[in-house]
Amino acid sequence: MEYTFFTPADHVPGNKREEIAGFLYEHLDQFGDEYQYIMNCINFALDDKEKFGGFILVSRENSAITGAVVINKTGMGGYIPDNILVYIAVHKDHRGKGLGKELMLKTFDKAEGDIKLHVEPENPARFLYEKLGFTSKYLEMRWSR
């Protein structure tokens, strides 16, 4: 397995961003978002001009994406974790083999500061996050227009 980190300094071209977005759209299953929202998140992570940026981690085998993580920096370190893990997905053919854990560990190594994430209670990835030390500190509440 080969791993690549992308940061705003890499000036990742649109076609590579679209490849990652397409992978996430397909492999997030019922826990995913619309393609355009995924692209917005990727663009935020790789923006070096106006936003806080972040990074993307991609794993590949034989040039095909097997997993991806998108981290956005919050710019709120100290009172909100410095980073939010927005997306993580593992290709269906590679699940249950430790790749999700490996992606998370590499993400921990790369991230500067704390990381938060949102996970639905019925998402099986929740158990991996708990094993890796994530705790449920707050109940998230949202108001929508």
Image (cartoon, grey):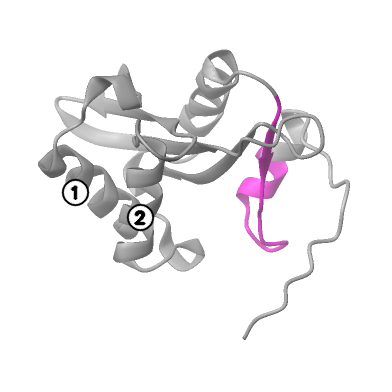
On-image quarter of the N terminus:
top left
What is the residue that sits farthest to the bottom in this orientation? 145
The amino acid type, in three-letter code, at marker 2 is Asn
Residue position for label 2: 40
Would you say 145 lies left or right of 62 here? right
Label ID, residue 18? 1
**Camera-side residue of 51 and 95:** 51
Residue 137: tell me if it is visible: yes
Which x, y percent locates residue 131?
75, 32
Which x, y percent locates residue 23?
27, 49
Which x, y percent locates residue 26?
30, 58
Q: Which residue is rendered at x = 36% and y = 48% of the image?
A: 92
Mark 2 vs mark 1: which is more N-terminal? 1
Would you say 125 lies left or right of 30 here? right
On-image quarter of the C terminus:
bottom right
Which x, y percent locates residue 17?
22, 42
Q: Is residue 39 above or below residue 69?
A: below
* Secondary structure of the residue carrying numbered label 2: helix
Question: What is the count of numbered marks?
Answer: 2
Residue 1: tell me if it is visible: no
Q: Which residue is rendered at x = 51% and y = 39% of the image?
A: 72
Q: Is residue 25 above or below residue 55?
A: below
* Secondary structure of the residue carrying numbered label 1: helix
What is the residue that sits farthest to the front in this orientation? 50
Would you say 91 lies left or right of 63 here? right
> What segment is highlighted magenta in the picture?
114-128
Residue 48 magenta-drawn? no
